[in-house]
Image (spheres, helix red, strand yellow):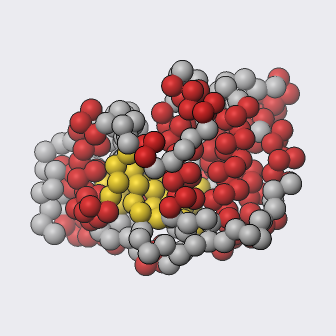
Amino acid sequence: MSFKLSHRLLYFYKGHITNWFWKDKLQRRRIRNSAYAEMILKSLSGYLPFIHKMVPDPSLKKMESSEEYFFTSWLQGETEAPEIIKKCLKSQRRLLGDKLIVLDNSNLDNYIDKSQDIKEKWENGIMSAAHYSDIVRLELLYKYGGYWLDATLFFTGPINHEIINSDFFMLSTSPKLLGHTLVQNYFIRAKKGDPLLKMWKDLLTEYWSKENEAKDYYVSQYLFRLLVENNEYAKYLYDKMPKVSIDKSQILWREIGNVPYNEELYRKMCEESFFQKCSYKMRKELLHEIIEGSMADYVLNDKVEV
């Protein structure tokens, strides 16, 4: 990823040189993350003129839809998905039944018309599947309204009414997890034609029409932050969004997955979040194996009596 030398030097100065060693490990990590986020946002500042001139179109309105759409995706095809993805999709179908639309390369064109140059960037390997999916989810929700669910979400209960009644919703990040991006986009609820969604969609499309690399894996979320911090109307709409932290949706994969199964702990987890964010990438700092008799074993292998 390319950054201006001045941006790199500022990050090195704030994230390392003045990040004094006597601070505790977590505090030093947060300072580094904040300095890194500042570098990313500065590298995206060329899009500020585009953001500043974005104004609401009075002819556009959020539209109530008689049908709620629930979209998820595994572009390679569900049969080719890792086992954990299949478990997550099974949990989503258990909740949503035939309402769940699983998109892949064979049926995506049936739902949206994508920019040809962006599609070619994905097909030619310039964009990753994850970054292509970032655009796809916004296009889908703007056109149809409803919900986007990442294929890595394991559902343990129904969606909260507060979210169902919202015009626009994403989980908010926290100082503990990815606080520098403001939001995460693995679960999105949006009404058809939502103006904040449109502004974000247009900004992300503008970025990928000009760029041949992602400034960061979370470039879509960084652009959202740049938007709501630099456009008055976008900020107004964002401030209306219910703020629910991502922390409780990641507890299974990050904290309690290998703890022996406990019904009380399971009920508490379900009360605090109606889904758990999983991963098909097994990393040391996350849950990287499913131990028999553990919380992860009981939840993901449907051993819990519901």
Image quadrant where residue 20 sits:
top right
Q: Residue at x 81, y 25 (%)?
A: 4
**Lateral position of residue 78 relative to residue 205, left or right:** left
Residue at 86%, 54% in the rendered image: 53
Q: State which quarter of the image contains the C terminus.
A: bottom left
The one of 269 and 13 positioned closer to us in this rendering = 269
Q: Is residue 209 left or right of residue 270?
A: right
Q: Position of residue 207 (x, y in %)?
A: 71, 38
Q: Is residue 77 visible in the rendered structure shown here?
A: yes
Picture quadrant of residue 91 = bottom left
**From where the camera sits, is residue 19 visible?**
no
Of 172 and 228, the residue lying toward us = 228
Relative side of 63 to 299, left or right = right
Percent position (x, y) of residue 192?
56, 66
Tell me the quarter of the image containing the N terminus.
top right
Q: Is residue 26 left or right of residue 202?
A: left
Residue at (72, 23) in percent of width and height: 2
- Residue situated in front as seen by the camera: 151 or 84: 151
Q: Residue at x 78, y 35 (%)?
A: 43
Q: Is residue 199 above or below residue 273?
A: above
Residue 102, percent across and down? 34, 49
Nearest the eye: 117 or 133: 117
Percent across and percent down for residue 130 are 49, 37
Tag count in the figure? Answer: 0
Pick out the residue farthest to the top.
124
Residue 170 appears in which quarter of the rendering?
A: bottom right
